[in-house]
């Protein structure tokens, strides 16, 4: 009788352990069964300008008081055939901005600057590789007199699902319905415009055509304006 009961309990215990092991096995293989997230799985794209939108570059060293408030990295960059030592100032909240936006958006940078100047800066500000593509001066529309327009159609963007963020009128001129004009940043440690832009992007992400809600969300975001 005692042996029968022991056998019965052993059977229940073994069944319990086997069940728990099976559940654990399913949890372990769960990530393996899901396909890895690819950039193309994100249905929306944000196209970011570089200078005075994400960074400010200058040959001037930080003034006293900026240390610790604004991230600054020294870099030797190429202008034409000259090497120039530059100070690259990183706009406040850029790191958290890229983290937030990368959850929902494919991130692209487009700049009217030359590749040899811009690429090392983009690589410096995006060490986590959240920016999937970079476009330079050769991908902008040249107007003459050193004026370059950003044209989303030139980079093959879907206008229903693409937002352009730029501090310049020449940046947003050709795609006003798709654009967020951000206040130019030249080093203020108290700037919080990127947080406001991230909030707009998060709120419009679920719309099939982002152009419909973009205007009103931009108007209500309290974005700063250039004087
Ligand atoms: Mg700019």
Image (cartoon, rainbow, N blue to C red):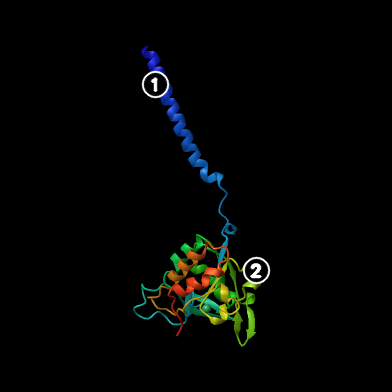
**Residue 111, label in figure:** none
Q: Is the residue marked 2 within 8 Å of ligand 1, measured from its CB?
A: no
Q: Dot 2 surroundings within 10 Å: few (below 14), some, or many (20 or more)?
A: few
39 versus 62 height, above or below: above
In this orientation, which residue lies closer to the viewer: 202 or 188?
202
Residue for badge 2: 156
Measuring from the top left, give residue 77's x and y in whole percent.
53, 76
> Which residue is rendered at x = 45% and y = 69% of the image?
94
Q: Is the residue marked 1 within 8 Å of ligand 1, measured from its CB?
A: no
Position of residue 226 in the picture relative to residue 158 (left or right):
left
Inspect this view and state whether residue 90 appears: no
Measuring from the top left, give residue 15's x and y in whole percent.
45, 26
In this orientation, which residue lies closer to the viewer: 215 or 195?
215
> Which residue is rendered at x = 40% and y = 14% of the image?
4
Report helix, strand or loop for mark 2: loop
What is the quadrant of the C terminus in the image?
A: bottom left
Q: Are marks 1 and 2 in contact (CB under 8 Å)?
A: no
Image quarter for residue 114? bottom right
N-terminal label among 1 and 2: 1
Image quarter for residue 68? bottom left
In this orientation, which residue lies closer to the viewer: 174 or 57?
174
Q: Dot 1 surroundings within 10 Å: few (below 14), some, or many (20 or more)?
A: few
Image quarter for residue 131? bottom right
Q: CA distance from mark 1 to mark 2?
A: 67 Å
> Which residue is rendered at x = 55% and y = 69% of the image?
212
Measuring from the top left, give residue 178's x and y in whole percent.
56, 72
**Residue 9, label in figure:** 1
Q: Single out the residue that lies furthest toward the left.
A: 65
Position of residue 159 in the picture relative to residue 227 (left or right):
right
What is the quadrant of the N terminus in the image?
A: top left
């Amino acid at each position: 009788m005692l042996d029968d009961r022991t056998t019965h309990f052993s059977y229940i215990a073994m069944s319990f352990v086997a069940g728990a092991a099976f559940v654990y096995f399913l949890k372990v293989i769960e990530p393996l069964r899901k396909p890895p997230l690819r950039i193309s799985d994100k249905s929306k794209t944000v196209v970011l300008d570089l200078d005075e939108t994400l960074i400010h570059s200058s040959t001037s060293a930080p003034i006293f008081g900026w240390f610790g408030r604004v991230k600054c990295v020294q870099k030797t960059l190429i202008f034409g055939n000259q090497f120039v030592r530059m100070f690259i100032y990183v706009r406040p909240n850029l790191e958290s901005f890229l983290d937030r936006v990368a959850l929902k958006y494919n991130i692209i940078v487009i700049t009217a600057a030359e590749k040899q100047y811009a690429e090392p800066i983009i690589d410096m500000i995006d060490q986590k590789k959240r920016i999937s593509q970079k476009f330079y001066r050769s991908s902008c529309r040249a107007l003459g007199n050193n004026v370059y327009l950003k044209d989303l159609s030139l980079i093959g963007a879907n206008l229903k699902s693409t937002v352009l963020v730029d501090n310049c009128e020449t940046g947003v001129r050709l795609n006003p319905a798709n654009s967020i004009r951000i206040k130019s940043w030249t080093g203020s440690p108290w700037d919080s415009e990127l947080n406001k832009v991230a909030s707009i992007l998060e709120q419009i992400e679920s719309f099939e055509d982002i152009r419909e809600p973009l205007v009103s969300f931009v108007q209500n975001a309290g974005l700063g304006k250039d004087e």
